C-alpha cells in the first residue's frame, strides 16, 4: 500500500519460502537477508542467489547477537521461552552456522569480494519497545502468538518491571553484516 501511495511500481511482494521463490536469472542487483540466513536451506538459497543476481550483483546478510548478560535479558529470555509457540522456526538442518561464518559460507558458494563487519551501539529499551521487537519477529509475532498475545505482553511487563520498575533496560546492541558479490563471469 505504501509503495502504491508513493507511485513505486517496480516492487512486487511475495509471501512464501525463499527456497521456493521463482525469479528470472540475473533479475536482482541486490539480495538482502535480515536475521534469517540460519533459517534457510543455505546450499539451495546460495545456488539460487548466484543465479538470481546480475553479474557483479551483491548479496548482503544482516544479523545481530545478544549476549544476554544483563539480568533483565535473562528474565526476558525466560518469558520468551515460555511463550515461544511449539514448532516455531529454528535453524534449518542444512544451515552450517555457527560452525562457519556467513562470509565463509559465501566463499564456499563461489561468491567473491566478501567482507564481514561488526558494529555496536548503546540502546535503552522500554517494555513497549521490547514487546514491539518481539512482535516484529516471525517466531513471536502477534500472528504466531494468536489469542495468547495479550497474556504474553502481560507476562513481559510483569517480569521486566520486577527487575526494573523504572521501565528502562540498557543494552549494548551488536550487529554484523556480511556482503559478497557475484562474479562477473
Image: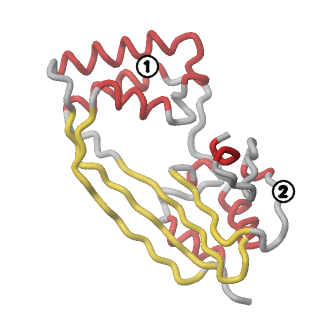
**Residue 169: percent from the left, percent from the top?**
21, 33
Name the secondary structure under disc 1: helix
**Residue 25: percent from the left, percent from the top?**
83, 71
Closer-to-camera residue (185/4):
4
| 67 vs 176: above or below | above
Q: Which mark is on residue 22? A: 2
Q: Quadrant of the C terminus?
A: bottom right
* Disc 1 to disc 2, C-alpha distance: 37 Å
Callout 2: few (<14), some (14-19), or many (20+) C-alpha neighbours within 10 Å? few
| 84 vs 31: above or below | above
Residue at left offset 74%, top offset 42%: 15
Residue at left offset 76%, top offset 65%: 48
Give the side of residue 86 with respect to residue 49, left or right.
left
- Residue indicated by mark 1: 82
Give the side of residue 54 with respect to residue 90, left or right.
right
| 87 vs 93: above or below | above
Of all residues shown, which one is farthest toward the bottom? Answer: 185
Residue at left offset 68%, top offset 66%: 46
Amino acid at each position: 500500500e505504501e509503495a502504491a501511495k508513493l507511485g513505486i511500481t517496480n516492487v512486487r511482494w511475495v509471501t512464501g519460502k525463499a527456497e521456493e521463490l521463482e525469479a528470472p536469472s540475473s533479475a536482482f542487483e541486490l539480495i538482502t537477508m535480515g536475521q534469517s540466513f540460519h533459517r534457510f536451506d543455505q546450499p539451495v538459497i546460495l545456488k539460487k542467489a548466484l543465479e538470481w543476481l546480475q553479474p557483479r550483483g551483491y548479496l548482503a546478510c544482516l544479523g545481530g547477537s545478544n549476549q544476554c548478560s544483563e539480568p533483565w535479558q535473562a528474565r526476558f529470555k525466560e518469558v520468551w521461552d515460555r511463550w515461544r509457540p511449539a514448532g516455531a522456526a529454528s535453524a534449518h538442518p542444512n544451515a552450517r552456522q555457527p560452525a562457519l561464518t556467513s562470509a565463509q559460507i559465501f566463499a564456499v558458494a563461489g561468491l567473491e569480494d566478501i567482507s564481514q563487519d561488526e558494529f555496536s551501539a548503546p540502546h535503552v529499551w522500554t517494555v513497549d519497545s521490547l514487546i514491539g521487537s518481539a512482535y516484529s519477529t516471525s517466531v513471536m509475532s502477534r500472528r504466531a502468538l494468536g489469542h495468547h498475545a495479550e497474556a504474553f505482553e502481560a507476562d513481559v511487563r510483569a517480569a521486566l518491571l520486577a527487575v526494573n520498575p523504572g521501565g528502562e533496560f540498557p543494552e549494548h546492541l551488536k550487529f554484523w553484516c556480511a556482503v559478497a558479490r557475484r562474479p562477473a563471469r
